[in-house]
Every structure is written in C-alpha cells, then in structure tokens.
Image (tube, rainbow, N blue to C red):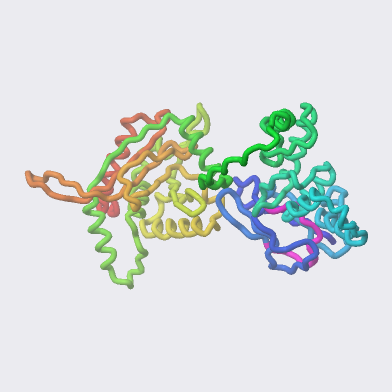
Amino acid sequence: MATAIIMPRNGQSVESCIITSWNKKVGDEVHVGDILFAYETDKSSFEEEAKMDGTLLAILHEEGDDVPCLENVCVIGAPGEDISEFTGGAAAAPAAEEAPKAEAASAPVPEKEAAPAAKATAEKAVGVSPRARNTAARLGVDLANVTPTGPNGRIIERDVLAAEKSTSAALKAGVPAGVTGTGLGGRITTADIENAKNAPKAAEAAPAAAPAAAAAPASVGYRDEKITRMRSIIGKSMKKSLQEIPQLTHMMSYDTTQIAAFRAALKAAPETLGLPKITINDIVLFAVSRVLLNHPALNANTIDENTMRFFDHVHLGMAVDTPRGLMVPTIFNADQKSLAEIAVEAKELAAKCQEGSISPDLLSGASFTVSNVGTMGVEYFTPVINPPQTGILGVGGMTDRIKVVDGAVKPYKAMGLSLSFDHAAIDGAGAAKFLKELATALENFQSLLAK
C-alpha cells in the first residue's frame, strides 16, 4: 500500500521547513534507514530516514521548496500502485516528465526543424524541476525566458509562475510582441518595453555605416547572493526589537582579580575531583542566574501592552555565534543548577548550535539573555533585546585598569558589562541596581558560591 511521507515537525514553534537536497529519485528502491531527503528550519538541519521498504513513487516537493510541517513530501509504495490520492488525481510529476522524452525518442525531428530558439530552450532547461516543467507546459511558458532562483541555478515552479505572470501583465498592457524580459523570473520591465518601442526609431536614425562601439567597461567585480532564511529572521527580529521596545543601555566594569584567582585554583585541582573546564563566561552565567532573582522585572517577558509575565526561575538564553548566524539556546532553570552543571550544559548547547543539530524547542523560552563578545576584543557594546524579553547583558573583554587602594595606585584587570533594558518594564535606576549587584557578585565570586 502506497504511503505518504510527511514533513516532520521538529519543535512546537516550527511551522515549515525548506528541503535542501534529495538523496533518492523517483523509481529508486528504498529501505528502512535510508536517507530520503535533507531539510532545515531557520536554525537547524535534519535528515529524514525511510521508515518502510518500497519504491519511491513520487516526489511532491523539490529542493528549495518551503514545505509546511505535516504536509506530504513524497510517496513510497510498490511499483505501479495508484498514488492519485496523494497527487490530486494527477500523475507524479517525475513520471509526467518522462512521457515527452519517450515521444521525442520515437519521432525524431529533422535537423532543419531544430530552430535555434528551441535549442536555446533545451540548453537553459537543464536543471528544471519536474513540477516546474509540467507547470511550464500547462501555461505555455518558454523555459528559455525563465530566470532560475532554485538551488544550484535550478528552475523551480515559482520561477515559471513569475515568468507567466510577467508575460500576462505585459500582454494586457499592450507590450510589443517579441519582447524578452530581463527582470527576475523573466519579468518584462519598463525598460524592456521602452527598448522594444524605440528599436524601430533607432534603426531608422542609425547611419549606414556606424562606427565600432566603444569597448565595454571592465567588470566592477561583485556577486549577488540571496539572504539566507536564518539571516532574514534575525534581521526581522532585531528590527522588531528596536522599533517596538524603548530600550536603553547601561555600562559598568568590574574587577576580575578574584575570578582569575578562582580559575587558577580550579586548574590546579586534582583530576580525581572530575571538575569540568569552567570559563569566565560560565562564571558570568552562574552569577546572572543568582542575581536576576532579585530583579523580577528583568527576569520577565512582555506578553502584550497590558501584560507582563514574571518567571519563578531563571531561564537563561546564551548567544552563540555559528557559521549560519546567531543562535540563542536556553539553559532552563539555571538558578537551580551548580556552576559545574551550567558549564557542562552551556558547552553542550553551543556544540549542538555549531553542528546545526539543536532542537528548535531549545532556542526559545528564555527569560533573559547573555551575549559575550569579549574574546573578540570588544570592551562595551549595545546588545539588542530579544523579544519578548525585557533585558540582555553584553559581556566585554578584559582590559588593564588602575585604581587607588589605601592611597596606593594598583593595576588590575577589568571586564565590561553592558545591560540593555526595556524602559517600559523597568526604570533606569532599577537597571543600574541590577548591574551594580552583578558587578559586586562577580568581584566577590567565592562568597557568591558559598551563598
């Protein structure tokens, strides 16, 4: 019995996924455990394994398609089975693609009839998805005039629809016949129309023997790339944050002398104690998880203009830089975990983000976020609040400072802290109190541990 394979929902917050590649093609045998296709959310990448043996009868979505979760992606069954219930009564797209090929093979066209335009169409149609080819045949769209936007320069269905829409609009507007669109997806632009209308006039005005055209200027050297889905979502989130949240930033530094001594003692501890590697970032996360409980307005989410949600525990977001972009996994109930537990979990979450294998459910639900760019030499910066949170702490790098102690000048290592806060949720004085308490806790970290 033919069975449809659906797009999985990896996380309650995920609405759709993009198919990045197919490992099987229609007609291939499939066995349990075989990788059918790879797909990604805005944050993570996954592979879908076959749960049954059979033959891949149909592919319902191509590479580059954004597929809603739980929607059918492909069909597995026995060769020859009826799959019309999954394809809307039509044959599978790849199967329809083979029919024209068979007819062309049985009735070869004489060489003289192979027009240059047809040859160009065939050359440009390399890498056309089956859905796009069928749609083009149905709408009468010449694939030679379609601009591909799919993966690896492939023409996909949306490209054909865009070209057809452009052509239809042009015909309604009385565009001269034979105009070739130069816009995205083969769209006919205003410039294309004007050039076509002015062509006869230009031909009449041209002298009989026109001088050779000047050499074209050298290429300025650039390339255009589509913005990734993840970068687009990050941009929209930051824009929303800056437009909708009245946020300000307080900055303060603290003396890292005691933290440095504490880390040196940990490194000298016997291996038999089984202590994990603890970084300064782990220490800051631990301190924030304790101090934040005393400042509920910063350990909160804004639900709407009239509602604030205050959390009983600290769910700490931790900004992680990855090759694909910024990710913020959450250490849930951080205030109930030891320094060692936070250190281990922070490294595990960061590793999963780097691999692109983290569950989307771990990328939401934070009550406050910490962003550390100190290793890159930044001393202070203005972190942007991650809605619906009301605050975010930026951690800077160490710098050499001096201070006067008992009349004597002493050098020390200082580290910068930058707190951006939602002024609708907390006033500047309240934010300053949190920052001061945090700096004091870090300067007296061993006392904080004892507490």
Total tally of numbered discs in the picture: 0
Q: Is residue 417 left or right of residue 101?
A: left
Q: Quadrant of residue 434?
A: top left
Whether residue 126 is situated above or below residue 393 in the rendered picture: below
Residue 364 can be seen in this image: no
Whether residue 56 is situated above or below residue 41 in the rendered picture: below
Front one among 274 and 411: 411
User: Where residue 364 sits: x, y (%)?
Assistant: 52, 46
Looking at the rendered image, the quarter that the N terminus falls into is: bottom right
The answer to whether residue 45 is magenta is no
- Identify the magenta region: 49-63
Give the residue drawn at x 61%, y 53%: 40
Seen as rendered, the residue at the extreme bottom is 272
Q: Is residue 413 left or right of residue 376?
A: left
Give the residue drawn at x 15%, y 50%: 411
Q: Is residue 136 left or right of residue 237?
A: right
User: Where residue 121 sits: x, y (%)?
Assistant: 77, 50
User: Where residue 284 sits: x, y (%)?
Assistant: 34, 50
The answer to whether residue 58 is magenta is yes
Seen as rendered, the residue at the extreme front is 209
Seen as rendered, the residue at the extreme right is 107
Front one among 6 and 298: 6
Q: Quadrant of residue 2?
A: bottom right
Give the residue drawn at x 54%, y 43%: 217
User: Where residue 136 sits: x, y (%)?
Assistant: 80, 45
Q: Quadrant of residue 253?
A: top left
Give the residue drawn at x 47%, y 40%: 386
Whether residue 197 is situated above or below residue 312 in the rendered picture: above
Residue 100 can be seen in this image: yes
